[in-house]
Image (tube, rainbow, N blue to C red):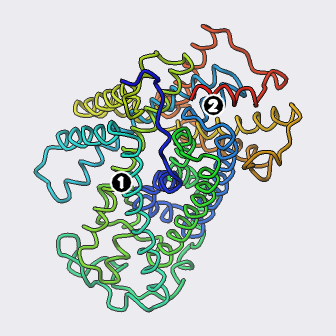
Amino acid sequence: MDNNNEMEKSLKTRHLSMIALGGSIGTGLFVASGSSISTAGPGGALVAYSAIGIMVYFLMTSLGEMATYMPVSGSFSTYATEFIDPALGFSLGWNYWFNWAITLAVDLSTISIVLKYWFPMWETWKISFVFLILLLVINFISVKSFGETEYILSSIKVIAVIVFLIFGILTILGILGKNPGMGMGPHHMGPHGPRELTQPIHGLSNYFIGDAPFVGGWPAIFSVFVIAGFSFQGTELVGITAGESATPEKSIPKAIKQVFWRILLFYILSIAVIGAIIPYTSPNLLGSGAGDIAISPFTIVFQRVGIPLAAGIMNAVILTSVVSAANSGLYAASRMLWSMSKTDMAPKIFSRTNNHGVPVFALLLTAIIGGAALLTSLFGDGFYGILVAASGLTGFIAWLGIAFSHYRFRKAYLNKGYKIDDLKYHAKWFPLGPILAIILGIIIIFAQDIPSIIHFDFVKLIVSYSGLILLFVFWIYYKLRYKTKYLKLDDIDVEKIREQHIHNS
């Protein structure tokens, strides 16, 4: 073990860019995007994803300003502690750690579902635990091992999206897809193939069939906000990687600028292409999970242009996506726990690192909790379902923490007489950006289960909003034990706080 309990700062700009980019490109884009088009139509889905994309832009720039100024692995938990209230930082940190530990179990379960496409006889739980050990070894070796693995996995996803967009646009233009149905195997197709593969494409005609482009009006668009929000989650990982960046003042601004536009471009263009090629009335747009790969919008488009084994190829891409998500989750949770232990918000043992700067005990606890959560799924969906529901809102809660922390950071920075121009990276549109992100974040959180609110279904409300309840429990515990107070701007010396954290890291 390393007596210094410090981590290696060996992540490069390309690592940070791909980690943030890969964190938000997964089954939400490859499979669930189809259900958004089915719900709100191609135009409605574009509106919803564009709105959430704008929100994510402000969140990323807010996080970028703070992470460049004070790069710490604790990210928004540390910022909330220093700029708002230590109790909030404590609750955000533990809530986020819990989220990734449980999400790790979900991702491991999904990996087994994806692999059953090729190996239906393999036992699900054995596949999951083999991958848990594999990811544990990758993360245990060094942060560079994690970074390189994530770079490769994310690159595969990015290439898949780029190829899809090229083929999709060529299909819309009538250059490809003139012989629909080529390359389709009988295992996944009916005798004539789905309608999407046997009907000619006429430019953007699918945008105007039936009730398109906007189906179901604002209520439908509003419901897609939630789906879009989940799809973009993971972008905040770049803030956590900042603590192990070799050159944070250069890497973070560059990564954030690149990542936002690429994500927005990929999502908006992908949905635009899917909406043009596949009519919103298609039942094949209703898939939402990794088990629906045969009817993924990406699979259908690849089949249409005659790519052999399209479903198998997309299944491989989705496998890399889910492995990437699990890899990032294990990393993010262990670093958050390590950071909290450095500030006495978690037991000191979790601050201990090996000779390569890896917080081994924080890594092991995360893996154990993830494995335990996975085991509960073997005994029924009851308790496991509650665990998953409790982790569902955590990403949005973290986003709120980022926006509010940035608002307070900027106010405190100016209050001490410092100039914005002195910041190596500063977010534009302040204070509109964080305020808009806070408003949209609150709307998305409370829109999780509107029917249960309207009908006051108490049990469903508890399950749907258990993430908020968990946050509140953590907050109350810390408040009562340490009697913390909401920090006044005059008491926040950002430069002194920054120097302390740089010295401790």
> Which residue is at the front of the view, 492 or 195?
492
Quadrant in which the C terminus is drawn = top right
Task: State which quadrant residue 409 falls in.
Answer: top right
Q: Which residue in the protein does label 2 denote?
A: 502
Q: Nearer the viewer, residue 321 or 500?
A: 500
Image position of 279 (left or right of 52): left
Task: Find residue 57 and report its image quarter.
Answer: bottom right
Residue shown at 48%/56% (left/top)? Answer: 18
Q: In the picture shown, does residue 347 fall above or below 461?
A: above
Q: From the top left corner, tell me how far across and down residue 471 is, in percent.
A: 56, 25
* Residue annotated with mark 1: 289
Percent position (x, y) of residue 104? 36, 38
Q: Earlier in the sequence, mark 1 or mark 2?
A: 1
Q: Residues within 10 Å of mark 2 (few under 14, many from 20)?
A: few
Say what secondary structure mark 1 lies in: loop
Disc 2 secondary structure class: helix
Q: Where does residue 349 sit, x and y in percent of width and height?
A: 42, 17
As measured in the structure, the alpha-carbon distance from the residue carrying label 1 to the one carrying label 2 is 42 Å
Quarter containing the N terminus: top left
Name above or below for residue 455 compared with residue 317. above
The answer to whether residue 474 is above or below residue 9 is above
Sort mark 1 into few (<14), some (14-19) or many (20+) by Cα contacts within 10 Å.
Answer: some
Quarter-wise, where is residue 134 in the image? top left
What's under tag 2, amino acid-wise? Ile
What kind of residue is marked 1? Gly
Write the residue at 19% across / 39% down. Answer: 125
The answer to whether residue 358 is left or right of residue 409 is left
**What's the mark number on residue 97?**
none
Residue at image coords 22%, 38%: 129
Q: Which residue is more in the foreground, 446 or 388?
A: 388
